[in-house]
Image (cartoon, rainbow, N blue to C red):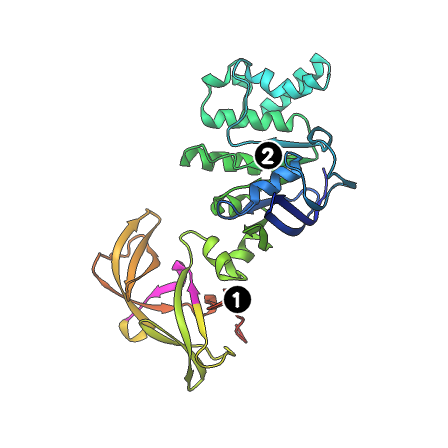
Amino acid sequence: MARIELQQIVKRYGAVQAIHGVDLEIADGEFVAFVGPSGCGKSTMLRMIAGLEPISGGELHIGERVVNDIEPKGRDVAMVFQDYALYPHMTVAQNIGFGLKMRGERPEEIARKVAEAARVLQLEELLDRRPGQLSGGQRQRVAMGRAIVRKPKVFLFDEPLSNLDAKLRVEMRTQIKRLHRMLRTTTIYVTHDQVEAMTLADRVVVLNRGNIVQHGAPLELYERPNCRFVGEFIGSPQLNILPATVIAADSGVALSFDGGVLAVPGLRLPVGTAVDLGVRPEHLLPCAPHEADFTVEIDVLEELGSDTLAICLLAGREVTVRLGATAGARSGQSLPLRFERRNLHIFDGETGRRIEVEGA
């Protein structure tokens, strides 16, 4: 296993700079997920770590070595791609053991390692089949087997579940989580699906436009996003945003938004400042009309079984509220809501940066 360190890593494509001086340390045995919108640089970062893309500037350390100029085969990393990259004419056993064969290992040793990988990934009954005879989830497990059989220092996953259906993605998430718990190999996992990132990773790294915006434990990013971008990107359904203006109030200042006014005693901002008030769907609480901070109209109900999502309208803006499974709500109904005040997020209206509230 190995510690990974990125020091001022830069990637340029001609005059275009895709990665802007990124610094990041990944501990030995840690599972880190890179997330962000398409084009944010997460796959480029992974490919530079793998050696598939040259680094334009900075230093990349794997273990004790600077590996900028080391070929992929010399970095002792294994990569799992979203398209599996299996050899169609080979059996499962031959696919898993191909890298070992190319390294010149003895046939009996290859057979032993392939059998062990097949046991870990529950592929024993499939070893004689070819990829065309396998389901998507089985093919992905074969690709993982080909990676783990080499016992690399680092695992790299590039959106490995994006080609699977929803049920298989959940099953494979569990498989990958178990695998990491068993092997404790340093792992970097790239995904556009923040639910995958939050359920799998010890730490989530959020990227945007070639920069790291925030990184931390999944719940840390969910509960204390450092900016509006992270707040909206992490969490499903996403954070509700209500544009607001700071106004004078008896308690100091308050936030005026379409539909209501919210007193925020610990907020230290000048009157007239534009902010964005963020609140997650589960932190908007249905209440009696006299207790409400504001009232919305239910537009669409999404019944999920365990709970119900109410897509509501407030002055033409959509607001999502998470209700109980048997809430008894209906479209067109008025819904009085109050904020769960300890779970509010306030962001600067111009920069999007988080604004701290004294005593919160």
Q: Secondary structure at mark 1?
A: loop
Residue at image position (34%, 58%) is 320
User: In the drawing, does residue 42 fall left or right of residue 71?
Assistant: left
Residue at image position (55%, 31%) is 81
User: Horizontal and vertical percent for residue 241?
Assistant: 40, 63
Front-lying residue, 196 or 228 = 228
User: In the drawing, does residue 355 fall left or right of residue 284?
Assistant: right
The crowding category of the residue bearing disc 1, from other C-alpha atoms within 10 Å (few below 14, some 14 to 19, many at least 20), is many
Mark 2 and mark 1 residues within 8 Å of each other at the beta carbon: no
Q: Is residue 99 magenta?
A: no
- The kind of residue tagged 1 is Arg
Quarter location, residue 340: bottom left
Spot the residue most to the right: 64
- Residues in magenta? 277-288
For the N terminus, the quadrant is: top right
Spot the residue most to the bottom: 250
Q: Which residue is mark 1?
A: 354
The crowding category of the residue bearing disc 2, from other C-alpha atoms within 10 Å (few below 14, some 14 to 19, many at least 20), is some
Q: Which residue is mark 2?
A: 179
Label 2 – label 1 distance at C-alpha: 36 Å
* Label located before the other in sequence (2 or 1): 2
Spot the residue most to the front: 15
Q: Secondary structure at mark 2?
A: helix
Placement of 302 over or under 357, stated as above or below: above
Quarter location, residue 291: bottom left
Could one spot residue 94 in this view of the protein?
A: yes
- The kind of residue tagged 2 is Leu
Number of on-image labels: 2
User: Horizontal and vertical percent for residue 72?
Assistant: 69, 31
